[in-house]
């Protein structure tokens, strides 16, 4: 296994998570921790003999293009383009978001690009990346032995949702007798059977034409606002520019929180997670990192997402710990004595922006150690909201990774 490069600036926690990722990923995986702002990268993993390791500068440029588009120089863009040209075609980009997923991909053997906006099948998906990963797994995974009939039906229905939808659209072309003829309404015919598809757009990358669009009756409007700009951004993207943010701007997702991105280039899958993704935190004392797992694809990409999410949550837990250790003042008192007082704190938490971790910790009254109240030593481990396997607080207003030895004033038994 390669040695970690430039270990001085990387914390032990990052290194540990990198090793964990290699352990949970597949043998031939590679991982990296990258600073998207400076482009500095640290890598680990043997990888496959088929593909040489990608150099640090190129990984840094890749992260900058995705997560820090305002810090991308021409030189970085060129490096990313050369990477794509060397690996082969970009076939798909998936961006899981808070309540919907965005897929941008090429239809096989055509010059067409398909955009799909798909809702999560599981409404409890919010800011918890593990829950989200499970939802993605449920939608993309094959049914398992022992699943209930209903669950089987659900997973069967949604098996490889992206691939089946691509197939559905592609087959309309072959039925029309030509891969070049597109009739308006083709997306509606191919996709309207699936109420999880909220919107879709079809472009031709060769001619730059916007061929068709579809949106579900419950989705406010078709995504593309400026079709000419969208088409230009897509052509650029698939030419290896990888400027995902430029495409998002043109399809009505300018404010999208891009924290997770999966890119398939040639026969490699790149799983990017901006750390931590809650879905997004920008804490002033530390700049965001991006965690990368790259490898040859496996049948169920949700397993790779689960591994990288797990590492991201561990790093987020560490970051919370550092905030508390660094002197973040939290409202430890008054401890709620009645349900009315308890509810009052919940109401205050519920008003917070879901990205606002700092205030959440302050209002919750977090401590990095147990607290004795009325002769009872209280800590997360004994609290009814504590999920031991995930080391997670399950109080809906307080969804954060915690340590068993921590405490907050919403402690309950
Ligand atoms: S409610 Fe507070 S004490 Fe209970 S698990 Fe959550 S953070 Fe820990």
Image (cartoon, rainbow, N blue to C red):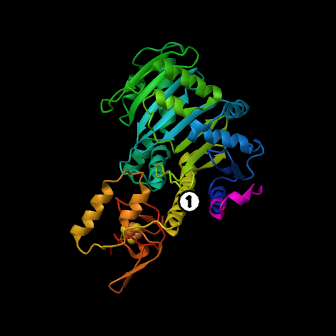
Would you say 413 lies left or right of 171 here? left
Work out whether residue 295 or residue 66 is closer to the camera in this orientation and state it: 66
Report whether residue 205 is seen.
yes
Query: Which residue is found at the position 58% from the left and 20% from the top?
Result: 111
Q: Which residue is mark 1?
A: 315
Would you say 230 lies left or right of 15 here? left
Would you say 257 lies left or right of 342 here? right
* 194 up-or-down from 272: above or below: above
Q: Residue furthest bottom?
A: 375
Dividing the image into four quarters, tell me where ligand 1 lies: bottom left
Where residue 155 appears, x then y in whole percent? 44, 46
Query: Which residue is found at the position 47% from the left and 21% from the top?
Result: 172
Work out whether residue 204 or residue 35 is closer to the camera in this orientation and state it: 35
Q: Is residue 71 magenta?
A: no
User: Which span is picked out in magenta?
Assistant: 1-15
**Looking at the figure, which quarter contains the C terminus?**
bottom left
Where residue 210 appears, x then y in whole percent? 47, 17
Question: Quick one: label 1, few (<14), some, or many (20+) residues within 10 Å?
Answer: many
Q: Is residue 10 magenta?
A: yes
Where residue 113 appears, x then y in whole percent? 53, 24
* 370 up-or-down from 191: above or below: below
Work out whether residue 240 or residue 318 is closer to the camera in this orientation and state it: 318
């Amino acid at each position: 296994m390669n040695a970690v490069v430039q270990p001085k600036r990387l914390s032990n926690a990052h290194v540990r998570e990198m090793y964990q990722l290699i352990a949970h990923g597949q043998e031939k995986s590679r991982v990296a921790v990258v600073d998207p702002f400076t482009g500095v990268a640290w890598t680990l993993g043997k990888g496959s003999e088929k593909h040489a390791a990608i150099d640090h500068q190129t990984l840094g440029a890749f992260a900058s293009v995705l997560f820090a588009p305002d810090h991308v120089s021409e030189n970085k863009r060129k490096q990313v383009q050369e990477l794509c040209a060397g690996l082969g075609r970009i076939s798909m980009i998936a961006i899981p978001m808070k309540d919907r997923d965005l897929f941008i991909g090429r239809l096989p053997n055509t010059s067409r690009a398909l955009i799909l906006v798909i809702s999560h099948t599981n409404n409890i998906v919010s800011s918890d990346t593990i829950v989200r990963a499970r939802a993605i797994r449920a939608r993309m995974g094959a049914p398992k032995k022992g699943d209930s009939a209903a669950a089987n039906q659900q997973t069967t229905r949604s098996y490889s949702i992206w691939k089946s939808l691509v197939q559905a659209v592609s087959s309309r072309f072959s039925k029309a007798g030509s891969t070049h003829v597109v009739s308006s309404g083709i997306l509606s015919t191919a996709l309207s059977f699936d109420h999880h598809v909220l919107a879709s757009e079809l472009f031709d990358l060769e001619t730059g034409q916007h061929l068709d669009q579809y949106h579900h009756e419950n989705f406010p409007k078709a995504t593309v606002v400026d079709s000419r700009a969208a088409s230009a951004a897509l052509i650029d993207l698939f030419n290896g520019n990888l400027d995902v943010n430029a495409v998002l701007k043109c399809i009505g997702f300018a404010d999208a929180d891009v924290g997770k991105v999966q890119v398939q280039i040639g026969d490699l899958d790149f799983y990017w997670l901006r750390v931590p993704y809650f879905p997004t935190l920008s804490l002033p004392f530390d700049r965001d990192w991006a965690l990368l797992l790259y490898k040859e694809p496996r049948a169920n990409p949700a397993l790779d997402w689960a591994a990288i999410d797990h590492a991201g949550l561990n790093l987020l837990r560490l970051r919370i710990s550092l905030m508390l250790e660094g002197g973040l003042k939290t409202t430890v008192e008054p401890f709620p004595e009645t349900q009315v007082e308890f509810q009052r704190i919940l109401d205050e938490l519920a008003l917070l922006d879901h990205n606002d971790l700092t205030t959440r910790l302050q209002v919750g009254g977090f401590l990095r150690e147990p607290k004795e109240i009325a002769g009872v030593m209280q800590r997360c481990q004994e609290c009814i909201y504590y999920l031991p396997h995930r080391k997670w607080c399950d109080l809906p207003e307080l969804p954060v990774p915690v340590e068993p030895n921590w405490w907050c004033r919403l402690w309950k038994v």
